[in-house]
Image: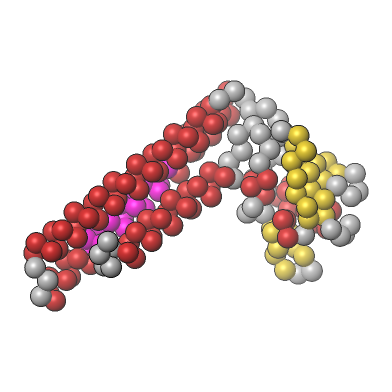
């Protein structure tokens, strides 16, 4: 691969990775500890990920169990979950917090499927914008004694790369939609 294409491929890969991270935080009726990834708790004045202050496990398919290493963190973790957009009410027995995920309704599944498609479209737009930036930078090369054929080859390579990443995004959208819609 031409070295001039590498920074753009790196950006496209980051767009795909970001989409996959977002999909990891969408719950599909099953308990997935990744839904907690973006939540931070106040740990002695420092916003800290829940996984850094507690043991997170999945004892049952629809339950996440959070066992803080310090008893004082139970209230902080519970507050972080309540103020988040998870939509799940935590229960605690003083030492362990449990999150029970309700079965998704058909309506909620369709809502999530729409959200998944929307996130996929946003990722495609990001990839296309990266391609546009790449093409703009290639056009600037014309001023530096680079032949039109070479610029055309770079643009074609950028287009092929864009097509590959869009196909990978579509595959991710399809897989996550199928997971959400499967009862």
Where residue 154 sits in the image (x, y, percent)?
19, 60
Which residue is rendered at x = 38% and y = 60% of the image?
11
Give the magenta-colored segment's residue range.
120-136
Q: How many labels does the image show?
A: 0
In which quadrant is the N terminus drawn? bottom left
Residue at image position (34%, 65%) is 7
Asked if the stretch drawn in magenta spans residue 172, the answer is no
Image quadrant where one finds the C terminus: top right
Q: Quadrant of residue 46?
A: bottom right
Dominant secondary structure of the residues highlighted in magenta in the image? helix
Identify whether 22 is placed above or below 69. Answer: above
30 up-or-down from 149: above or below? above
Q: In this view, does 177 lie to the left or right of 132?
A: right
**Residue 121, visible in the rendered structure:** no
Q: Give 104 or 172, whichever is nearer the viewer.
A: 172
Task: Name the residue at the right extreme.
Answer: 94
Q: Residue pushed farthest front?
A: 1
The residue depicted at 53 percent of the width and 47 percent of the height is 22
Q: Is residue 104 left or right of residue 162?
A: right
- Magenta stretch containing residue 130, yes or no? yes
Residue 157 in sight: yes
Residue 96: x percent and y percent? Answer: 85, 47
Q: Which percent across, then down, holds residue 146?
A: 12, 71
């Amino acid at each position: 691969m031409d070295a001039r294409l590498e920074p753009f491929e790196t950006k496209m890969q980051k767009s795909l990775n970001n989409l996959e991270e977002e999909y990891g935080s969408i719950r599909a009726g099953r308990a997935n500890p990744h839904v907690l990834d973006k939540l931070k708790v106040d740990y002695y004045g420092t916003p800290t990920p829940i996984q850094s202050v507690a043991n997170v496990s999945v004892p049952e398919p629809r339950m996440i169990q959070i066992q803080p290493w310090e008893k004082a963190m139970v209230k902080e973790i519970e507050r972080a979950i309540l103020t988040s957009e998870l939509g799940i009410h935590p229960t605690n027995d003083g030492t362990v917090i449990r999150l029970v995920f309700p079965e998704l309704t058909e309506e909620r599944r369709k809502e999530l499927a729409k959200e998944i498609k929307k996130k996929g479209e946003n990722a495609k737009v990001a990839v296309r914008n990266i391609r546009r930036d790449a093409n703009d930078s290639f056009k600037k090369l014309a001023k530096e004694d680079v032949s039109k054929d070479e610029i055309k080859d770079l643009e074609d390579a950028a287009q092929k790369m864009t097509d590959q990443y869009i196909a990978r995004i579509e595959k991710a959208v399809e897989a996550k939609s199928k997971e959400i819609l499967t009862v």
